[in-house]
Amino acid sequence: MDSNGPLYLLHQGDVVKFGFRVERRHVNPMNNLHGGMMASFCDMLLPLSVHRKDSTVGMRFLPTISLQIDYLAPAPLGCWVEGEAELLRATRSLVFAQGLVRADGVPCARVSGVFKIGPEFTLETAKP
């Protein structure tokens, strides 16, 4: 995500928000956020939120098994895209989560995903 960022994370108490400003490099020919960028954003939104909301999976790698995105509205060039997600269920081996993404406050994507609970990681092992 280094080439797609900067991406911002806000974590205050139970609130976890993930966001970015739509730049020229993120848009399609209609000057709206490209669906692939939205998918990448959503694929980070869900596990990053789960990491901060559930201590049992907080430092575990969560590779994506399934990601479902409903594109609700365009996110135009220059807008602020922000998502919030919730953990629906965590089993011994899987995490189920869902979220809502807004563009300047307007719902633009609904996402749900299933993630495998993988091995533990540290911030050092997560660096490229």
Image: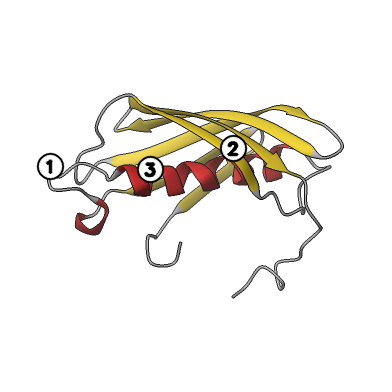
Label 2 vs 1, first from the N-terminus: 1
Above or below, 2 against 100 in this view is below
- Asked whether 34 or 79 is in front, the reply is 34
Q: Secondary structure at mark 3?
A: helix
Q: Amino acid at mark 1?
A: Met
Q: Amino acid at mark 3?
A: Met
Above or below, 97 against 25 in this view is above
How far is the residue under mark 2 from the one under mark 1? Answer: 28 Å
Label 3 vs 1, first from the N-terminus: 1
Q: Residue at point 66% right, 36% down?
A: 13
Q: Circle 3 sits on which residue? A: 38
How far is the residue under mark 2 from the one under mark 3? Answer: 15 Å
User: Residues at badges 3 and 1 in contact (C-beta under 8 Å)?
Assistant: no
Q: Quadrant of the C terminus?
A: bottom right
Above or below, 54 against 28 in this view is above
Q: Residue at point 53% right, 29% down?
A: 99
Which numbered disc covers residue 30?
A: 1
Q: Residue at point 25% right, 41% down?
A: 79
| Quarter of the figure with residue 113 | top right
Instruction: Specify few, some or many for label 2: CA neighbours under 10 Å numbering under 14, 14-19, or 20 or more.
Output: few
